[in-house]
């Protein structure tokens, strides 16, 4: 991971939390989680402030159409792992155009927010 972003140290700690994450049928649990962690590290980015528009299904604590912003931690093929620093919450943004990203209701554990 790139140590330039001050939030990557906390991300490393948070990547150890596997609670509440369903392992896909047929996957070996340890290998699955390690693959997700490795993928986040492989796709680590420079620290950039990014925003997305909240869209359906949305979040309980945010209005549809509002913006959520945070530091980009990793990016791969339309998936953007972002940390909102004031809440300390991880989000997954989707899209290929950084000026038109969507936040579709996925937040919480960084392993939950990331797809491999």
Image: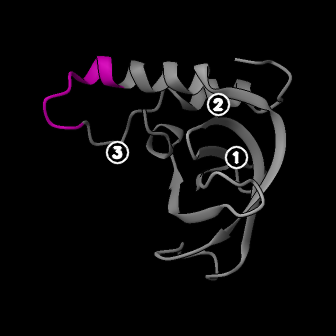
The answer to whether 110 appears left or right of 45 in the picture is left
- Indicate yes or no whether the magenta region holds residue 38: no
Instruction: Specify the label residue 112 is tagged with.
Output: none
Q: Is residue 17 above or below residue 89?
A: above
Disc 1 and disc 3: Cα gap in Å?
Answer: 19 Å
- Tag on residue 11? 2
Q: Residue at x 70, y 46 (%)?
A: 83
- The circle drawn on residue 20 is 3
Q: Residue at x 72, y 24 (%)?
A: 9
Residue 108: percent from left, percent from top: 52, 51
Of the residues under marks 3 and 2, which one precedes in the sequence?
2
Residue bearing the label numbered 1? 83
Task: Tell me the quarter of the image containing the C terminus.
Answer: top left
Element marked by disc 2: helix
* Comes first in the chain, label 1 or label 2: 2
User: Range of the magenta residues?
Assistant: 24-32
Looking at the rendered structure, the secondary structure element under dot 3 is: loop
Crowd rating for badge 2 (residues with CA inside 10 Å; few <14, some 14–19, many 20+): some
């Amino acid at each position: 991971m790139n140590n330039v972003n001050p939030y990557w140290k906390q991300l490393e700690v948070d990547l150890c939390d596997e609670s509440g994450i369903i392992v896909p049928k047929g996957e070996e649990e340890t290998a699955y989680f390690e693959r997700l962690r490795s993928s986040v590290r492989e796709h680590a980015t420079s620290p950039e402030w990014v925003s997305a528009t909240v869209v359906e299904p949305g979040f309980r604590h945010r209005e549809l159409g509002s913006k959520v912003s945070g530091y980009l931690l990793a990016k791969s093929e339309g998936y953007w792992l972002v940390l909102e620093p004031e809440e300390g919450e991880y989000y997954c943004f989707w899209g290929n155009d950084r000026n038109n990203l969507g936040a579709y209701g996925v937040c919480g554990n960084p392993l939950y927010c990331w797809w491999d």
